């Protein structure tokens, strides 16, 4: 008996056109000089917020996914600052050492 295996269709979880538009808008805002009286970090957060809204409106991905991506990107600033101070790096080293010799 010969059984036929149905074809599998693979779909991307996002629309790349909407994602591209959101990235261009976010980078465009981020590259504009920071207004006087506003910190560079706050200007970057505004760019990320607007890019997230554009991604949601353009239906680049589901709203929950777009929000999680924005949350992770906003956390990069904290992680970068702490890696520069070697706080997180030393914590990761301790975790790895404990896992190896635990």
Image: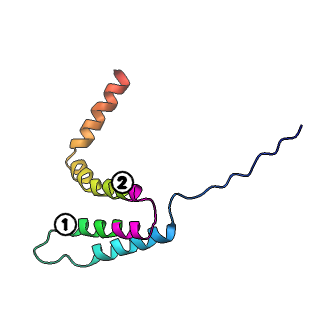
Give the class, few, some or many, for how many residues have Cα within 10 Å of label 1's Cα (few <14, many ≥20): few
Q: x, y (%) of residue 36? A: 12, 77
Q: x, y (%) of residue 41? A: 20, 64
Asked if residue 30 is among those painted magenta in the image, a careful observer would answer no
Residue at horizontal 31 percent and vertical 26 percent from the top: 98
Left or right: 84 as drawn, with respect to 21: left
The quadrant of the image that shows the N terminus is top right
Mark 2 and mark 1: span between their CA atoms?
Answer: 19 Å
Q: Nearer the viewer, mark 2 or mark 1?
A: 2
Q: x, y (%) of residue 95? A: 30, 31
Left or right: 11 as drawn, with respect to 84: right
Residue at horizontal 13 percent and vertical 71 percent from the top: 38
Magenta region: 53-66
Q: x, y (%) of residue 73? A: 32, 57
Q: Which mark is residue 42?
A: 1
Left or right: 84 as drawn, with respect to 62: left
Q: Which residue is mark 2?
A: 68
* Camera-side residue of 18 and 26: 18
Q: Is residue 25 above or below residue 49?
A: below
* Camera-side residue of 71 and 2: 2
Q: Which mark is residue 91?
A: none
């Amino acid at each position: 008996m010969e059984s036929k295996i149905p074809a599998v269709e693979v779909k991307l979880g996002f629309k790349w056109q909407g994602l591209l538009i959101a990235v261009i808008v976010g980078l465009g805002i981020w590259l504009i000089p920071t207004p006087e009286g506003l910190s560079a970090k706050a200007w970057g957060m505004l760019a990320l917020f607007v890019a997230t809204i554009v991604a949601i409106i353009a239906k680049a991905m589901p709203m929950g996914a777009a929000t999680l991506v924005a949350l992770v990107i906003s956390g990069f600033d904290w992680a970068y600052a702490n890696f520069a101070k070697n706080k997180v790096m030393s914590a990761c080293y301790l975790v790895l050492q404990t896992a190896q010799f635990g």
